[in-house]
Amino acid sequence: MKRFVFLTLLVGAFSWAQLQAQTVHTVDGNAGAVAQFSGVQAAIDAASPGDTILIAGSPDYYGTFNIYKELHFVGVGFFLSTNGVPGLSTHGASVGLNFKNDNLLGNSAGSSATGLNGLLNSDPGANNIIIDKCYNAANNWRLQGSVTITRCYSRNEIRIDAADSSISNTIIWGVHMTATNQSLTNSVVRGYTNTIPNQNITNCIFLEAVNGASLDLDANYTYCLKTGGGGLPNNGTNVNSVLLGDVFTAVGAADVDAYYQLKDGSLAVGAGLGGVDMGAYGGAKPYVLSGVPGRPRMTRFDIAPTATGLTELTFEVESQAFAE
């Protein structure tokens, strides 16, 4: 009698068809897991420029790694249990990535991170980095090369230092923008902004300042909304002194993304530039609850613990797809 043991790869987040369609390296640090690698560094060493590294959810932190070539990292999202996201595991993929630019070791320009939890930084010259659907729980991010940040949730500061960088559809505590031609759009800011002239902030919602936090008004603020007291320029497009309860559903804890969905009849609905909704859930590329990557998540896998034959094994699989 031969025993067949199935251990889910990346908690079923990725289909075999997708794995076969691209150069992919899989990492799963859970005990007994079946993956190509149990650690992220080994996958980085094996990967060629342009490859994708899929990282399974785990209760443990994978570590922090320096990236010297273009690589694309994909995790599984965050707040999975809190938001009731279906799947065989509710753990996120916690990892830190430093996108490097080194004359000898290489340049990580063009890399991306999706659905990860942890520290994300970049060197000057490590340009065209894309960060999507990532979660920043305990660190300040500093991106010194050009970067596009979309649909993230940050409980700390995000600092962008290069021109032609942008943050959009993000829920964030603090924003520090240091170069011209930068933008912040369709985001929810829970704390402060630090800006300079020749920057644009549009379709954003700002919460009442706490702990001495405040808005820096050097940038151009248009079609924005402020809860609590005033603070936004009175230029005919901004709205000040709005009650928080007139904007968000405010369901659950204020440090979880679902809280910042717009309620029916919200003053932010259709109030943005071009008639779009203000805040992270509006605009052309709305925030995705829990930052779940647009790949199927396995929700059920049934298999007999033993098999008597060597030619046939029957099992049942269910999965649920998520929008990109």
Image: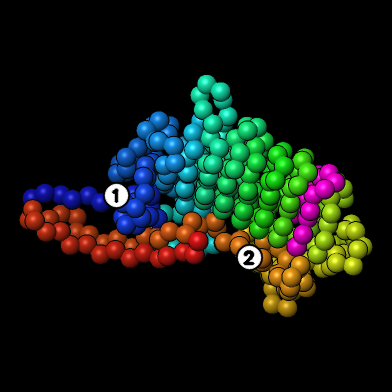
Residue lying at 49% horizontally and 64% vertically, measured from the top left: 323
Mark 1: which amino acid?
Leu
Q: Is residue 39 above or below residue 10?
A: above
- Look at the picture and state if 163 lies above or below 220: above
Q: Quadrant of residue 121?
A: top right
State the mark number for residue 274.
none
Q: Is residue 8 visible?
A: no
Q: Residues within 10 Å of mark 1 (few under 14, many from 20)?
A: some
Q: Position of residue 199 (x, y in %)?
A: 80, 49
- Residue 284: which disc? 2
Whether residue 34 is in magenta: the answer is: no
Which residues fall within the magenta stretch?
188-203
Secondary structure under the numbered disc 1 in the rendered image: loop
Mark drawn on residue 7: 1
Q: Main secondary structure of the magenta part?
A: strand
> Is any part of residue 38 visible from this angle?
yes
